[in-house]
Amino acid sequence: MNNSRFTAWITWALILGLIWTVVSRVSPNQSQVQTGSVAKEGFTAPDFTLDLLDGGSVTLSDLRGKVVLVNFWTSWCPPCRLEMPAIEKTYRSYKDLGFVVIGLNLTAQDSEKDAANFIKEIGVSFPIALDRDNAVGNLYLVTALPTSYFIDRKGVIRSIIVGGPMSEAVIQSKVEELLREDQ
Amino acid sequence: MQIELLYFDCCPSWQTGLKNLKSALQLEGMEVEVNLVNVQGEANAVRLQFLGSPSIRVGGVELWAEERETFALSCRVYPTPKGIKGWPTVEMLREKLHALAGKDS
């Protein structure tokens, strides 16, 4: 290969690399998800980063060491609405002991305005994450609403509850059980 | 062929599911009545092994079967080509009905 052909080849490779870097970057509104992991009981919860309704973002893996409830919901889903006060109450009772809730709104199936109005109406104080492109819903293979994932301090999904509304007693017993376990 | 649409009255998405099902049946040239089953109460959800609203069964078989250990009143969502929706699209339904019709013939 002569020098000029080699230089042209390198130039094209650099241009293509630059184009790839630009087109493959994650936009601010796009969720970041960990692909290739399984959202099943006994498996490490697939990681994600999502924007929060009140600004900022949340990354699931940053919550290691805490007991986490990831609750998938939409504002138009009646059982989701019904169980939200019980989740809020449990959150307030146990947050100081290391319990965190991520209210994961399937925003692609909802509207941020409706979600925000509902959250305000109930007085929810835990973080509400916005899954604007269904990335996390798809990752967790959500097939019904509400769906709740109880995750232990090591980041392992310990139980999944599909449907609802969950009673306060059910949420509390699961949270207490996981909080009792050693870190 | 018996077609049932199981629904939970509180989840409004079942109405779009029914509309899509009727369109799919029409496009597939299938003149079949859709029996609506209103699932009321947790006990019935368990008894009927209800996977969420709406769920569609043909000849008693779930069109989108799932391995589930618990059954409850819930709003079902479907992975569609346009993301997660509260109902299967007409095309998704046509594909399933077409496959079933092929099996029957």
Image (spheres, coloured by chain):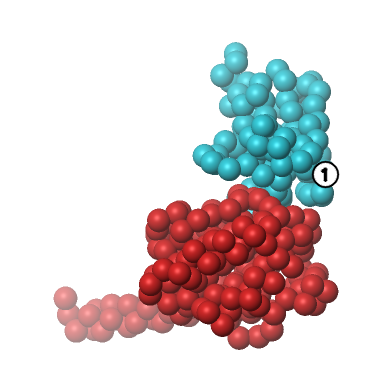
Q: Residues within 10 Å of mark 1 (few under 14, many from 20)?
A: some
Number of numbered callouts drawn: 1
Q: Pointer 1: what residue? A: B9
- The quarter of the image holding the C terminus of chain A is bottom left
Chain A palette colour: red
Task: Kindly indicate the quadrant of the structure image that contains residue B57.
Answer: top right
Q: Residue at x 83, y 74 (%)?
A: A121
Relative depth, front residue between A129 and A132: A129
Identified by mark 1, the residue type is Asp
Relative height, residue A85 to residue A94 (above, below):
above
Give how far across and how far down residue A54 sits, in percent. 69, 84
The chain under label 1 reads: B
Look at the image and tell me whether residue B86 can be seen.
yes
Give how far across and how far down residue A58 sits, in percent. 55, 79
Q: Is residue A30 left or right of residue A123?
A: left
Q: Is residue B54 left or right of residue B71?
A: right
Q: Residue at x 80, y 26 (%)?
A: B35
Q: Is residue A160 left or right of residue A16?
A: right
Q: Which chain is cyan?
A: B
Relative depth, front residue between B22 and B52: B52
Q: Residue at x 32, y 77 (%)?
A: A13
Task: Kindly indicate the quadrant of the structure image that contains residue A82.
Answer: bottom right
